[in-house]
């Protein structure tokens, strides 16, 4: 296994699936810095006693501030007496979308998330849209319907992935060559988390300013410029040997284009640069205000990409990456992109959004920073 350093170029969020409510967090100051404290039920119980459990439950059910509850039942308690951890905060909100932590409280990026982002980059780089892929993604699931009883269409790349990564559709994933690409978890140090107010760049006909705070939410991130190390291995020799064997479970060999980590990193860099070039060009041609800082940040990240350096690559990963980076954007080249992919990906497209480009919004923070860019360096 090779050791790979991962550095967060921008804040990264891999979600735990948990939203911390108003009754579970408290805001406090420490000097000039603002923090959000995640409360510890055990510590609160010690402060207020068993006699006040019913009052505490009432506050939780009504989603009232835990600070108001403690002001009444433990007025002298300082935040350090009743929180289990704190997050440096650059925004305010009544809930916090929590990032993933291990059992010891360290934030981490799972190997599965890194591998998924790599898989998307490889898919977008390998796919040939001229080979009848329009039919491959036209799927209707008759067992699922919308609230009006109409069948729900789903634009899925699974069959395309199977045709590229596996020997046959009916034998995937057992025959998928990504079995031979092994990626470990990346664990970061405690207290590297920050909370940011996430807003949108949004194209709206009635607004000249692209900044849209109507759906703002507070999200916990691993801060930028944090580093960790994870393990990565491409078992090319084993994949080639396995592909030559006659067995009930045949496998596809790892392609020569990504036979080693250097070649894989080069492919990822080309993919990321292509998407960044498109993004920068697109927003430079939007005749509205508010995207200048966003574009400048993208240009800074693009300048980090060095196609001649095969030991490093820039990858986008996690929440807030945007539809084009999450999917690789290869479906935009399909003949039925407008007729199938957009309506499936954007609900109510026919009713409300036909006049808009897709996708029409991007996630940023209040300072126009972007999310999810990491730099990988083979050690």
Image: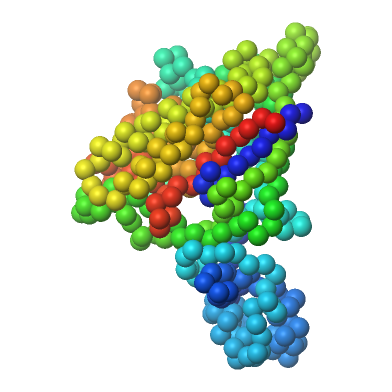
Residue at 43 percent of width and 18 percent of height: 129
Residue 166's quadrant in the figure?
Answer: top right
Name the outermost residue toward the front: 31
Horizontal placement of 168 versus 149: left or right? right
- Counting labels gives 0
Residue 55 in which image quadrant:
bottom right
Camera sees residue 193: yes
Q: Position of residue 218 (x, y in %)?
A: 49, 62
In which quadrant of the rendered image does the N terminus lie?
Answer: top right
Which of these two is toward me, 115 or 167? 115
Looking at this view, is 79 or 61 the one in front?
Answer: 79
Compared to residue 322, the image places residue 234 above or below, namely above
Residue closest to the eye, 140 or 177: 177
- Quadrant of the snapshot with the C terminus: top right
Above or below, 229 relative to 166: below
- Give how far across and how far down residue 32 sits, in percent: 52, 72
167 up-or-down from 41: above or below = above
Color theme of the render: rainbow
Kindly identify the residue that appears in the image at 56 percent across and 40 percent down. Answer: 374
241 left or right of 325?
Answer: right
At a point 66% along the width and 16% down the height, the residue shown is 259
Residue at 36% over, 60% down? 213
Q: Where's residue 366, x and y in %?
A: 40, 58
**Residue 223, position as x, y percentages in the image:** 57, 53
Query: Horizontally, is 112 left or right of 91 in the view?
Result: right
Residue 55 visible within the image: no
**315 is higher (above) or lower (below) than 306:** below
């Amino acid at each position: 296994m090779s050791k790979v350093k991962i550095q967060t170029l921008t804040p990264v969020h891999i979600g735990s699936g948990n939203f911390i409510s108003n009754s579970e967090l408290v805001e406090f100051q420490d000097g000039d810095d603002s923090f959000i404290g995640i409360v510890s039920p055990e510590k609160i119980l010690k402060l207020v006693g068993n006699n006040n459990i019913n009052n505490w439950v009432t506050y939780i059910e009504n989603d009232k501030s835990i600070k108001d509850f403690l002001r009444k039942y433990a007025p002298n308690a300082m935040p350090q007496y009743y929180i289990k951890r704190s997050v440096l905060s650059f925004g305010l909100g009544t809930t916090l979308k929590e990032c993933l932590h291990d059992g010891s409280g360290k934030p981490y990026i799972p190997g599965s998330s890194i591998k998924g982002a790599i898989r998307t980059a490889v898919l977008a780089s390998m796919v040939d849209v001229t080979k009848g892929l329009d039919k491959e993604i036209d799927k209707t699931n008759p067992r699922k319907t919308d609230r009006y009883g109409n069948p729900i269409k789903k634009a899925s790349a699974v069959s395309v992935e199977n045709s590229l990564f596996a020997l046959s559709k009916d034998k995937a994933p057992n025959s998928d060559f990504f079995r031979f690409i092994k990626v470990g978890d990346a664990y970061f140090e405690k207290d590297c988390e920050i909370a940011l107010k996430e807003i949108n760049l949004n194209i709206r006909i009635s607004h000249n300013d692209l900044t849209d705070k109507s759906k703002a939410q507070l999200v916990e991130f691993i801060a930028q410029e944090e580093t960790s190390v994870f393990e990565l291995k491409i078992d090319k020799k084993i994949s080639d040997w396995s592909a030559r064997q006659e067995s009930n479970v045949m496998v596809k060999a790892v392609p020569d284009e990504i036979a080693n980590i250097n070649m894989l990193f080069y492919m990822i860099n080309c993919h990321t640069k292509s998407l960044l070039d498109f993004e920068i060009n697109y927003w430079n041609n939007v005749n509205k205000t508010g995207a200048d800082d966003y574009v400048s940040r993208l240009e800074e990240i693009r300048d980090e990409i060095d196609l001649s350096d095969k030991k490093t690559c820039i990858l986008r990963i996690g929440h807030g990456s945007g539809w084009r980076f999450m999917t690789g954007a290869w479906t935009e080249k399909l003949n039925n992109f407008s007729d199938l992919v957009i309506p499936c990906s954007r609900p109510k497209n026919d009713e409300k959004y036909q006049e808009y480009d897709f996708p029409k919004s991007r996630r940023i923070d209040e300072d126009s920073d972007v999310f999810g860019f990491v730099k990988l360096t083979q050690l």
